[in-house]
Structures are given as structure tokens and as C-alpha cells.
Image (cartoon, helix red, strand yellow):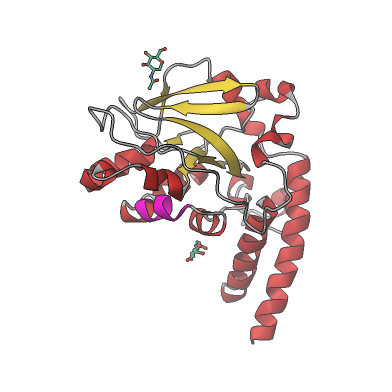
Amino acid sequence: MKCGVALLAAVVMSVSALHHAGAHRPLVKPSPATTTRTDARPPARQVAKRANLTAILTLDGPFRAFLSYLQETNLVEVFESQAYLTDQGITIFVPVDTAFDAVKPPGLSELSVQELKNLMMYHSLPKHYELADFERLSHTRPVTTLAGGMYTVNVTYDEGTVHVHSKWAHAKIVGSVSVDAPMAIYELDRVLLPDALFHAQPPVADLPAAPPPSEEDAGEPEPVVTTQFGSPVAVDAPVSSAGAGDDDGRFFACYAAAAALGIVMALVAL
Ligand SMILES: *[C@@H]1O[C@H](CO)[C@@H](O)[C@H](O)[C@H]1NC(C)=O
Ligand SMILES: *[C@@H]1O[C@H](CO)[C@@H](O)[C@H](O)[C@H]1NC(C)=O
């Protein structure tokens, strides 16, 4: 799935590179030698591949409801800025569409745009967390979300299962959509409902049955219980080093292949 995202991003970027003469194409990791050779090259941090949140949520859905709320409240850029213009990065909890369906009217429809914005920001943490990092985070209570102030959640970690608790809803991480630093995106089975917005329990339907696996995912194991939990040692590793290592190797191999494909497609289109 991660590769799918990389493929799309790579195709989009390689095509757009053809339209912007001089734009760099980060096909390879910058080596110290290349960064010292020219002053014009931006610092390594900006060279880092940039994920397109809209594209990810569109491609790896069903996250239509979350995405349209993000767009309605002009938060796509805010989230991307938190990811790429801060040292901390971002973690986004994206409830699936069926989770939004389960919140019965008036539920979210009676929220003002500002309240909706707070609700969306409540679904993210101002720091990039790998799945294994949640074990340590579960010792912090409460955890302040991007919405700040009273908008806090509690995280619990039980043998690899991560729950995110709000006052009126207890959600579970049911999938990793994209975990590469600095933007981690996890799928939730529930919409988080904070007491800062809801003074009483909003009516919520029972958890819908798990949707049938999409064609792309058929045959793959549940993403949450795969390699993410491979090494408990990683829990104590600094979060800032997340994303380095084998994953990057796979990403770049995939990226290079996809970029080549994108260029071929663009040339064919000409
Ligand atoms: C991100 O993806 C969306 C949807 O695929 C696209 O409309 C938008 O132009 C992309 N943004 C960038 C900066 O590439
Ligand atoms: C989070 O944990 C704190 C301390 O245990 C508790 O007071 C608070 O009610 C919890 N909040 C939620 C939303 O579960």
C-alpha cells in the first residue's frame, strides 16, 4: 500500500518535473558530497520526499468523509505544514467513512465550521509517531492533540493494539495508511468525540462490520500487525530517526521505478 502511494506520488512528481525546468527530482538520497558541492542545493530536510495528503487519502480510502471535512476547514495545508515545516512532524488519525456514518445526526452536522476544524485537528498529534512509539506514549496522560488546550486524548497500547480514547468514543487503530516520517497516517474505526465539543454522549451506531478487503489488499495480512511491531527495541529509538533504514531503500527502489514509468507516460502523452 505504501508502495502504491509512492507510485502515485512519483508519477505525479515526475510528470510535474517536466513542467518545471530546474526543479530537482529527489530520485536519490543526497550524499554529503553533493550537498557540499553546491550552495544552491536546499538543506537535506527540504529534499525529503513530500507526501501529498490529499492524494494519499484519495487513493488509500475509504476516507472520503475525513478528506472532505479537511478540505472544508482548509486544513490540508495546515497538516502538511505541520509535517514539513516543523521538526516534529505529524500523526493523523483518519476514521474510515463507515465511522463517520455511525455518528448519527445531528452529531457532526450541528457543529460550526470552527468546531469542525477543532474536531479535525483533534484527530492529529503534533509529532510523528511510529506504531511502536505508542507504547511509550501510552504512559503519557493525557496527550494533547493538534487542536491544543482541552482537546486531549489518552492512548493505550496492548500487545500491539493501539486505542485512542476520547471522552465519548474509544477508537482503535485498524491500519497504517502511511507511516514514513514526517507524516504518519493511521486508520481509526471510530470518530473521536471530545468533551470539549460534546457535552453529552452523541448517538453513535454500533461498530459496522469490517468492510470486505479491497482488491489491492486482498491476500495481504492486516497492516497493523506486520513489521511495525517487529522490534520492541525501536520503542526507545528517537522518533526523529524514524524513516531511515530499510524502508527507505524499498521506497527509493519503488520510487525510481515509478518515476521512470511517469516519464515514459509523460513522453507518450507528448
Ligand atoms: C496532491 O494531490 C491532489 C489529488 O491527487 C492534486 O489535485 C494536487 O495537485 C496534488 N498537490 C501537489 C502539491 O502535488
Ligand atoms: C485520560 O486519562 C486521565 C488520567 O487517567 C483521565 O482523568 C481522563 O479522564 C482520561 N481522558 C479520556 C478522554 O479518557
* Boundaries of the magenta span: 63-69
Residue 94, relative to residue 72: is it above or below?
above
Q: Which residue shows up at 78% across the image and 41% down it?
A: 246
Image spot of residue 259 (x, y percent): 71, 66
Magenta stretch holds residue 65: yes
The front one of 67 and 260 is 67
Residue 25 inside the magenta-drawn segment: no
Say which quarter of the image contains residue 145. Answer: top left
In-image side of 97 versus 246 (left or right): left
Along the line of sight, the residue nearer the viewer: 98 or 238: 98
Dominant secondary-structure state across the stretch colored magenta: helix
Measured along the vertical axis of the image, is residue 225 above or below residue 8? Answer: above
Residue at coordinates 74% horizontally, 53% vertically from top-left? 252
The answer to whether one can see residue 240 in this image is yes
- Image quadrant in which you'd find residue 253: bottom right
Q: How many marks?
A: 0
128 left or right, relative to 100: right
Extreme residue toward the bottom, this view: 270
Q: Quadrant of the C terminus?
A: bottom right
Q: Residue 79: image x %, image y %? A: 44, 46
Residue drawn at the location 28% of the way across and 34% of the way down: 202
Q: Nearer the viewer, residue 210 or 109?
A: 210
Is residue 23 visible in the rendered structure shown here? no
Question: Where's ligand 2: which quadrant?
Answer: top left
How far from the left and from the top, in percent, is residue 11?
64, 67
Residue at position x 57%, y 38% in the image: 174
Give the x, y percent position of residue 83: 50, 43
